Image (cartoon, grey):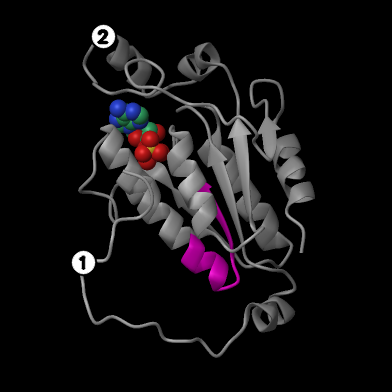
Amino acid sequence: MSGPPAHKAEHIYWTERRVTAAQRADRNGHRGWVVWLTGQRGSGKSTSATALERELFQLGKQVCVLDGDNLRHGLCSDLAFSQADRKENIRRVGEVARLFAEAGMICITAFISPYRADRQLARAMAPAGKFIEVYLNAPLEICEQRDWKGLYAKARAGEIKDFTGISAPYEPPLQADLQLPTHQWGVEKCVAAILARVGQ
Ligand code: ADX
């Protein structure tokens, strides 16, 4: 299946808004963006996302983070890790990120988002030209070494199924807008690299 699911409901309409993106940008001093972080578990997505959020907040920007582990406690608590569930996870996150970006915020997402097609869908949902895909490309061995919760070890022992990098695929971006070698760069350098790409 590709693209969002068809509407189930009939007789639904669209309400036009009365605050424009330009008016929001005037007030906030910046446009809404989706900064989409992708990479294996342990590649530094949550660390980079929260550091970037802190930095943007200090700079007076409207900013929020959607984090994979966190959303799976609520909005996505009915989803596990099959390919279909991950697709639905990313579809929901893409929709929420779009809503935040349309509301004028810089929305940083931190999800493994292992499938190219799902990330492509998230890009297509975002306001045109206001989505950057940031690939945290630390090699799997390094991600495994950093995993203080021991999930990779459990996955290798067969205790967790469909585990990304072990028993489920990770499809690296072919043309990421930005690559962060988080095994070589510290978090400040990663944040600075993203800041340089997120314009007005
Ligand atoms: S995604 O693939 O659907 O984008 P998401 O980022 O929401 O994944 O969740 C990843 C987090 O779920 C990991 O950081 C880890 O803590 C947890 N997790 C539990 N089981 C798995 C699994 N089978 N594969 C990957 N992550 C898992």
Circle number at residue 157? 2
Q: Residue furthest bottom?
A: 18
Residue at screen point 68% across, 32% down: 179
In reply to whether residue 63 is colored magenta, the answer given is no
- Residue sitting nearer the eye, 173 or 167: 173
Total number of numbered labels? Answer: 2
Residue identified by numbered label 1? 8
Residue 43 versus residue 32 in the image, above or below: above
Residue 95 versus residue 162 in the image, above or below: below
Residue at screen point 48% across, 87% down: 16
Residue at screen point 30% across, 33% down: 83
Identity, as a three-letter code, of the amino acid under mark 1: Lys
Identity, as a three-letter code, of the amino acid under mark 2: Ala
Q: Quadrant of the C terminus?
A: bottom right
* Residue at disc 1, secondary structure: loop
Residue count near mark 2 (Cα–Cα under 10 Å), binned few <14, some 14–19, many ≥20? few
